[in-house]
Amino acid sequence: MSHPKVRWDREVNAAYIAFRELEAGESSYKLPIEDDRGDTTMLVRLAESGELLGIELLEADTQMPRLLRGNPDNG
C-alpha cells in the first residue's frame, strides 16, 4: 500500500486510517489510547509482530488531520 486508506463514518464520528490490511491467517490486537480523563479516544491496531496496521479515531472530526477531513473521498 503506497498511501494510507482513510474510512470516515461521519454518523458515528469515527475514522480508520489503514496502513495495511491483515494477511490471511494473520492476527492483530488493539491498544486503547486514553485522554487525561481516562476516556478512550483512539485505538491503535497492531499485527502480532508489532507492525502498525492502522489507527481508529473515535473523535474523528477533531482528531483527523485537516488535510484528510477536507477530502470528499473520506466517508
Image: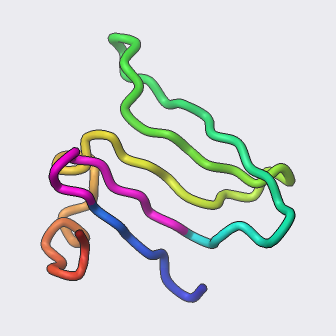
Residue at figure coordinates x 41%, y 25% from the top left: 40
Q: The magenta stretch spans which residues?
A: 9-18
44 versus 52 height, above or below: above
Q: Main secondary structure of the magenta part?
A: strand
* Relative image position of residue 43 (x, y in whole percent): 50, 40
Q: Residue furthest bottom?
A: 2
Quadrant of the image for the C terminus? bottom left
36 versus 7 height, above or below: above
Query: Which quadrant of the view contains residue 64?
Result: bottom left
Residue at figure coordinates x 57%, y 70% from the top left: 19
Q: Position of 15 compared to 62: left or right?
A: right
Q: Is residue 29 magenta?
A: no
Q: Nearer the viewer, residue 75 or 41?
A: 75
**Tally of marks:** 0
Q: Residue furthest top?
A: 37
* Relative image position of residue 71 (x, y in whole percent): 18, 78
* Relative image position of residue 11 (x, y in whole percent): 16, 50
Quadrant of the image for the N terminus? bottom right
Residue at figure coordinates x 74%, y 49% from the top left: 28
36 versus 69 height, above or below: above
